[in-house]
Image (cartoon, rainbow, N blue to C red):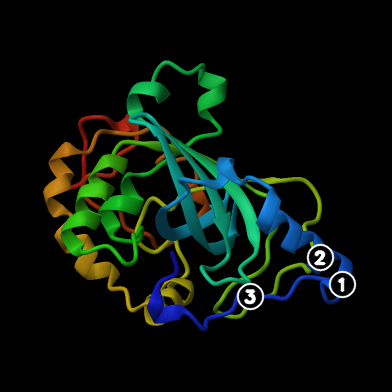
């Protein structure tokens, strides 16, 4: 499901290696005719946002999620660095509802980031959906949590280079939770390329604020950034009852 406004936008880098060759082309043709790709069916929910590495605020990137709704409490997503045919697979994310998250062991919860800022700020978008449909879908993600691992940092569309192959261990990713945490140039580059308006989406979602619950992990990286501003509805559970007005 490519957004037509960025059909010619390329991923941040071209992977290492040369051409597909005759043997791989032949294999692909055989797979098209004979092999079943059933597990890939249903990954048709598309949202785009931003991730940063947990504890590494300088490592930020655009993240294009293609998700399958398993049930009302679980989504499984594959993450790419773009939404074109040559986009690179860079990670995975599991999204669970508050109902599933709350009973998890405390040590397990450290792997899961909160989503309320991404929803309420307008950063997270579902390109191609009408505003009403996008708003309804994002409402379902309110109060949810994500467990995200990136295996490949391919760089950023606004210019920072990545590596030509996946290297090292997977990186646990985190969410932004205050205005000013995501690099302005990164967000602006995406918004320009995809014709998105974060501020307009933020205003459209203000009706969600009273539905937002305090979440674990909102303040996990608070000290890693400076000059940031909290927004209404995004509160750490440690400060329950002191929401920003």
Q: Residue placed at 26% from the left, 30% from the top? A: 240
Q: Mark 1: few, some, or many residues within 10 Å (few <14, many ≥20)?
A: few
Q: Earlier in the sequence, mark 1 or mark 3?
A: 3
Tell me the residue that label 2 is attached to. 26
Q: Is residue 177 left or right of residue 54?
A: left
Nearer to us: label 1 or label 3: 1
Q: CA distance from mark 1 to mark 3?
A: 27 Å
Tell me the residue that label 1 is attached to. 22
Q: Is residue 55 visible?
A: no
Q: Nearer the viewer, residue 163 or 79?
A: 79
Quarter of the figure with residue 194: bottom left
- Compared to 47, does 234 lie above or below? above
Q: Nearer the viewer, residue 12 or 72?
A: 72
- Compared to 153, does 137 lie above or below? above
Q: CA distance from mark 2 to mark 1?
A: 6 Å
Q: Mark 3: few, some, or many residues within 10 Å (few <14, many ≥20)?
A: many
The numbered dot on residue 12 is 3
Q: Nearer the viewer, residue 116 or 67?
A: 67
Asked if disc 2 and disc 1 are in contact, CB closer than 8 Å, the reply is: yes
Q: Is residue 34 left or right of residue 132?
A: right
- Compared to 115, does 239 lie above or below? above
Quarter of the figure with residue 216: top left
Numbered-mark total = 3
Q: CA distance from mark 3 to mark 2?
A: 28 Å
């Amino acid at each position: 499901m490519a957004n037509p406004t960025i059909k010619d936008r390329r991923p941040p880098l071209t992977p290492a290696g040369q051409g597909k060759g005759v043997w791989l082309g032949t294999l692909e043709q055989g797979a098209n005719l004979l092999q079943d790709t059933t597990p890939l069916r249903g990954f048709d929910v598309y949202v785009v946002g931003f991730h940063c590495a947990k504890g590494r605020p300088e490592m930020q990137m655009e993240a294009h999620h293609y998700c399958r709704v398993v049930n009302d409490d679980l989504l499984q997503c594959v993450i790419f660095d773009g939404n074109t045919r040559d986009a690179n697979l860079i990670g995975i994310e599991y999204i669970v509802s508050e109902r599933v998250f709350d009973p998890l062991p405390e040590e397990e919860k450290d792997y899961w980031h909160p989503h309320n800022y991404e929803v309420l700020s307008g950063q997270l978008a579902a390109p191609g959906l009408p505003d009403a449909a996008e708003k309804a879908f994002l409402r379902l993600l309110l109060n949810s949590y994500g467990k995200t691992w990136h295996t490949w940092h391919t760089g950023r569309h606004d210019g920072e280079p990545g590596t030509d192959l996946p290297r090292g261990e997977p990186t646990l990713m985190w969410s932004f939770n205050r205005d000013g945490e995501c690099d302005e140039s990164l967000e602006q580059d995406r918004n320009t390329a995809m014709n998105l308006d974060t501020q307009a989406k933020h205003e459209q979602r203000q009706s969600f604020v009273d539905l937002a619950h305090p979440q674990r992990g909102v303040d996990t990286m608070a000290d890693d950034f400076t000059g940031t501003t909290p927004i209404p509805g995004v509160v750490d559970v440690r400060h329950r009852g002191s929401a920003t007005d």
